[in-house]
Amino acid sequence: MKVAVTGGCGFIGSHVVDKLRDQNIEVRVLDNQGAPHRDDVEHVRVDIMDQQALNAATRGIDVVYHLAAVADVNNVAADPTGSVALNILGTANVLEAARTNELRRVILASTVWVYGAAREEIVDESVCFDPALTGHVYTTTKIAAEMLCHDYQTMYKVPFTVLRYGIPYGPRMRPALVIPIFMRKAIGGEPMTIAGDGSQNRKFVYVEDLADAHVLALAPEAENQTYNIDGSEEVTILRIAETVHRLLGGKGIEFVPARTGDYGGKQVSSTKAAREIGWTPKVDFDLGMERTVAWFLESQGQPALNRA
């Protein structure tokens, strides 16, 4: 089997590439934002907005993992039209390339942010969305990308799998994400700032656990299915800051006004993923944070944690 990974040079994509190679699956990384972190994969610099180039880059591929997107909600808020283009039209381009080249599957990276548009507080993959509740352009782009997968399956018989990510963390995190921001402030002697009261909660999922789901999603049972891939415990933003403070010290925590349209968190069930493809998270939050802090300190040339 040979697969392509759009965004394969990024935080999550690089770990997905690792897990695929662990299974001796051939990988072609499609990314114009950098270079792969390992040399045993093919790399094609391609812009997913260029349909002709994307069609060429996916020839000879069996499955494409589509992870390339504007994923930082602050970047989406700053450039909504550009984000809509990349997240929605870019997904349509990937699906069209899959149709043109008769790929066996498109596996789409989505997010639990879509549940911001659900009225229920306890949610699984069967809930319906209310357009009046989306609250953020990012949420809308990911719902639209999922809908396109369904449309291409209905109209053109392009098989898909949607993975709705919990909030990922771990080694190689983008600097703009909340945990690296907190870590930089802690070692720099600055207070960590929290938008709102810090009660926003997500089931943060360790990135290697998340990457495991992408291999399991190749199973026949996952065809034309959607799965929540979330952590095992609810974690508040305040707990993240307190954990960073415990591990790294620093000047503590300050609170600032909440962001407009922020996803406050729902009780997301990943039972379907466990039942159908055998995925469950293995790394708990405290262990994952210790590994993440150790990676961060090494990447910054700082002394390692003393766990004695």
Image (cartoon, rainbow, N blue to C red):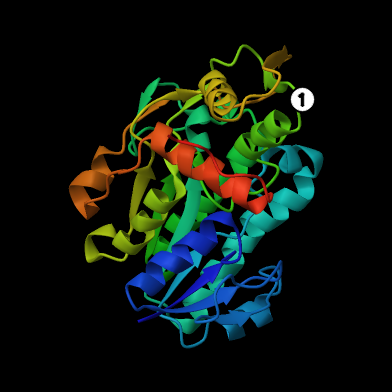
Instruction: Report the quarter where the N terminus lies.
Output: bottom left
Image position of 173 (left or right of 18): right
Q: Which residue is mark 1?
A: 190
Give how far across and how far down residue 155 sits, in percent.
43, 65
Image position of 15 (left or right of 77): left
Classify 176 as above or below 41. Answer: above
Amino acid of disc 1: Glu
Q: Quadrant of residue 264?
A: top right
Classify 100 as above or below 214. Answer: below
> Is residue 275 visible from the viewing direction of this image?
yes
Q: Residue at x 68, y 19 (%)?
A: 195
Give how far across and how far down residue 68 sits, in percent.
60, 60
Residue nearer the viewer, 137 or 281: 281
Judging from the image, what secondary structure is the residue with disc 1 in?
loop
Q: Residue at x 66, y 14 (%)?
A: 196
Instruction: Report the quarter where the C terminus lies.
Output: top left
Give how far across and how far down residue 102 sits, in percent.
43, 81
